[in-house]
Every structure is written in C-alpha cells, then in structure tokens.
Amino acid sequence: MSTVSYYTEEGLKKLKEELDHLKFVERPSISQQIAEARDKGDLSENAEYDAAKEAQGMLEMKIAKLEEMYSGARVIDESQLDTDKVLALSIVKIKNLNTKAEMTFTLVAETEADIKTGKISVNSPIGTGLLGKKVGEIAEIQVPAGLVKFEILEISR
C-alpha cells in the first residue's frame, strides 16, 4: 500500500519526469549493456555482465520506489490553503527566540525539500514542529543542537 504524499504541481511534474527518464532512457540503456556483455561469451567470468545485471537490479528498485511515490502523490490546491495555521506549502516566517534570528521557510514534501531555496520538509524536525501552529504561538522543537523555541511571526502561501 502506498503512502499519500502531497506535492506542488512543479514537484509532481519533476517526479514524473524522473520516473519517465528512468523507464524510457536508463532502462533501455542497461538492457543494451546486458545484451552487449552477453555477446562477449562465457557469463560465469564476465564482469561487465555482472555489473550490468547489478545496475539493472538497482534501477528497477529505484523505478519501483518512484512508481509507489507517484501512485500516492496528490497535488495540493494552493488557492485553498488556510493561512490561519501552518500547513504543507505554507510560507512561514519564524523567529528563533534564543538567537533572535528571523527565517522564512516554505514547508514542502520531503522530495521537494531544498534548504538553499528555503524549502524544508514537513517531515523534518522543524517542519513537524511548526505544523498546526498559528501566528504568535511558540513552537518548541528538538533539533540536534538541543531544544529550540521559535515564534511564528507570519503565515502566507
């Protein structure tokens, strides 16, 4: 049974593109490598054949995983998001009460997370700690460095 994951339209498109690339580009390429290695003779001592078969197995596992993710994928309608509390795809401005530093993050699906662009996973410690909070509330979040308190300053989409 697949797990339901929520994506932006852009994130779901990237997932589909990666899956299609693996199925329609990588898979035929590995099949060709196996055929070429098989043509070289004795398979019991053929390192190229063994390597190609191993690569094929890894590729098939990756394809199966992406197919499962894609089958459980749901696109979030951003226009229907509630900005009263932190949800997936919320843009949240927070203040670290220890350092007084302010940060803005967008909470996204795990596969779309990219800290360099300010996108954190809803499954990360900070993402999980912020979910459901409202403006003005304090989120106490256990991170590797210890317990950190964040004040929710603003929620938008």
Image (cartoon, rainbow, N blue to C red):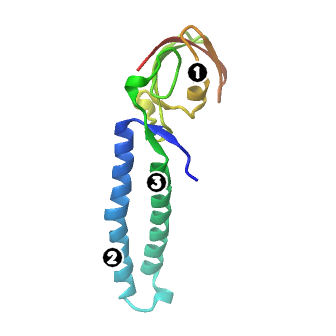
Is 3 in front, or is 80? 80
Whichever of labels 3 and 2 marks the residue nearer the N terminus, that label is 2
Q: Residues within 10 Å of mark 1 (few under 14, many from 20)?
A: few
Whichever of labels 1 and 2 marks the residue nearer the N terminus, that label is 2
Determine which of the numbered discs, if any, sits on residue 32 in the image: 2
At horizontal 46% and vertical 36% (from top left) the residue drawn is 113
Q: At numbered mark 3, what does the secondary structure look like: helix, strand or loop?
A: helix
**Horizontal relation, residue 137 to residue 117: left or right:** right
At horizontal 33% and vertical 70% (from top left) the residue drawn is 28
Residue farthest to the bottom? 42
Q: CA distance from mark 3 to mark 2?
A: 23 Å
| Badge 1 vs badge 2, beta-carbon distance below 8 Å | no
Using the image, determine if residue 2 lies above or below residue 51: above
Residue kind at label 3, given as amino acid type? Leu
At horizontal 39% and vertical 47% (from top left) the residue drawn is 15
Q: Residues within 10 Å of mark 2 (few under 14, many from 20)?
A: few
Determine which of the numbered discs, if any, sits on residue 132 in the image: 1
| Badge 3 vs badge 2, beta-carbon distance below 8 Å | no
Q: CA distance from mark 1 to mark 2?
A: 51 Å
Foreground disc of the pair 1, 2: 1
How far across and down, in percent of the image, does residue 21 sit?
A: 33, 58
**Which residue, given by chain and number where applicable, does mark 3 sit on?**
66
Is 60 in front, or is 77? 77
Q: CA distance from mark 1 to mark 3?
A: 29 Å
Q: At numbered mark 1, what does the secondary structure look like: helix, strand or loop?
A: loop
Residue farthest to the front? 80
Residue kind at label 1, given as amino acid type? Gly
Using the image, determine if residue 39 lies above or below residue 113: below
**Horizontal relation, residue 70 to residue 9: left or right:** right
